[in-house]
Image: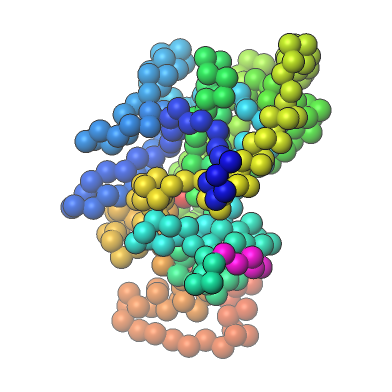
Amino acid sequence: MIKGLAITPPTLGRIAIGSVVEKNGKRLPVKEDFFTITSNIQGKDGWIKHPVHDQLLKTSGQDKLRSIPVRLLFNDPALNLRAEYCFFDRKTGRPICVGNGETCRRYSSSGIQNLACPSPDQCEFAEGGTCKPFGRLNVKLNDDDEFGTFIFRTTGYNSIRTLTARLSYYQATSGDRLACLPLQLKLRGKSTTMSHRSPVYYVDITIRDGVSLEQALIEARAEDSKRREYGFDQNVLDETARSGFKNGLFEEDSEQVKNLLDEFYVNAGELDGNDARQATSIENVPSNLTGKLDQILARKGSKITIPTAALESVVAQSDIVLGTPNAL
């Protein structure tokens, strides 16, 4: 096995809840209230839809795809959904630092260093908002390809937090038979102060509509028994995948990362007010309260200095929010 190359599940296509559009010569992300399933091929108008998209849309009987029946490839939730903090070099598309909130691996002039990861809000290296959570979820949409998957990528806390919780709970309740459960991706929305009360959309994973948890657990037990009878070893598959992921620092190559930067890591200086409200993520928003107050007052042509004690009082009594875009 080539060292330094992450071995990931074969990817047949992408699942997205947003797109990138050209505006004034710039590529900007736009939020959407439905799923789009694409192939791995791009045309002049963006990613080309995968045939399974229209098949599922027709089956749903709806005008928009808001749920997708799926199965998972692995029993270990951390193999199906990999989430970490990522700091990218925007010029080269190269990941500079990748961490999990406890430890990180960071490129330096002397090679790769293993360091503590305090999370972006408390990391001096991450100042400027260029380090963000980044999650990847691989799912199977049919049984035509035993190991072929479609990948959903997100930098949204809502999606990452919800998917992490659900996968852990389903693994526990199914007796470690996560790969045998009949599941579905489901689009959900909510309004927050940060979104200016407009809806933000995120991805959840649940038992399929029309199937109770009891029925799903019975089906998973039967599927697991059938697999064992014909020699399918899920434990060995999980361990093989775990070794493959650990073989490299980052899953995506530099070309894929450039597309990810367009989609998820937009520079605030490149957006006008309307664009910012539609973007799925944004950079250079001050993470500390002083910076946020300065940014608010800068719009009015003034600047202030506030003692630390006063800042703590403000934090305890109010909710000061900047005009940041909707996050998935």
**Residue visible at 55% across and 33% down?**
9
* Residue 176 or residue 201, whichever sits in front: 176
Against 165, residue 145 (above or below) is above
- Please name the predominant secondary structure of the magenta segment in the image: strand
Does the segment drawn in magenta span residue 115?
yes
Residue 9 seen in this snapshot: yes
Name the spot of residue 143 as percent of width and height, x first. 56, 15
Q: Position of residue 313 (x, y in %)?
A: 62, 78
- 130 above or below 74? below
* Residue occupying the far front of the picture: 1
Task: Please state the horizontal and vertical placement of residue 275, each as a whole percent of the image.
Answer: 30, 53
- Residue 328 appears in the figure: no
Q: Is residue 284 inside the magenta stretch? A: no
**Residue found 74% across the figure and 15% down from its top:** 231
Looking at the picture, the colour scheme in use is: rainbow
Q: Which residues make up the magenta segment?
A: 112-119
Q: Nearer the viewer, residue 240 or 103?
A: 240
Task: Out of 2 and 293, give the one closest to the viewer.
Answer: 2
